């Protein structure tokens, strides 16, 4: 199945299934439901950064004020995430 034909919900389900298989189907105690908003926000933030050319474009894309943007930027450690990705 082509990855781009999957819905976002199917893709998330697939990632959870793969993660679960890696730990012998024991994903207990992770509080996934409570953590979902944070997981989704981080994913959207990192996507926006990768899809735009500048931080200003990213701020505008997300509809964030500059201070809020940089608070989130520090929290998600975006620079180290993308620099580590290039090293792999």
Image (cartoon, rainbow, N blue to C red):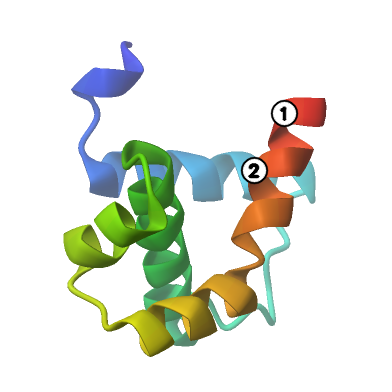
Q: Looking at the image, which residue sits at the far top?
A: 1
In the rendered image, which residue does mark 1 sit on? Answer: 86
Position of residue 18 relative to residue 16, above or below, is: above
Image check: 6 left or right of 71? left
Measured as percent of width and height from the top left, residue 76 is found at 60, 70
Position of residue 64 relative to residue 40, above or below, is: below
Circle 2/circle 1 CB separation < 8 Å: yes
| Residue at image location 73% in from the left, 41% down from the top | 83
Q: Considering depth in this image, is 50 or 20 the residue closer to the camera? A: 50
| Residue at image location 46% in from the left, 66% down from the top | 42
| Residue at image location 41% in from the left, 88% down from the top | 67
> Which image quadrant: the C terminus?
top right
Position of residue 28 relative to residue 84, above or below, is: below
Measured as percent of width and height from the top left, residue 62 is found at 23, 66
Q: Considering depth in this image, is 25 or 58 the residue closer to the camera? A: 58
Image check: 59 left or right of 76? left
Can residue 58 be seen here?
Answer: yes
Measured as percent of width and height from the top left, residue 9 is found at 26, 49
At numbered mark 1, what does the secondary structure look like: helix, strand or loop? helix
In the rendered image, which residue does mark 2 sit on? Answer: 82
């Amino acid at each position: 199945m082509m990855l781009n034909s999957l819905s976002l919900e199917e893709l998330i389900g697939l990632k959870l299934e793969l993660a679960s298989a890696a730990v012998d189907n024991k994903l207990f105690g992770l509080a996934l439901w409570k953590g979902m908003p944070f997981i989704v926000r981080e994913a959207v933030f990192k996507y926006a950064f990768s899809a735009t050319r500048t931080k200003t474009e990213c701020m505008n894309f997300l509809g964030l004020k500059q201070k809020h943007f940089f608070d989130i930027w520090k929290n998600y450690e975006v620079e180290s995430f993308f620099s580590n990705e290039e090293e792999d």
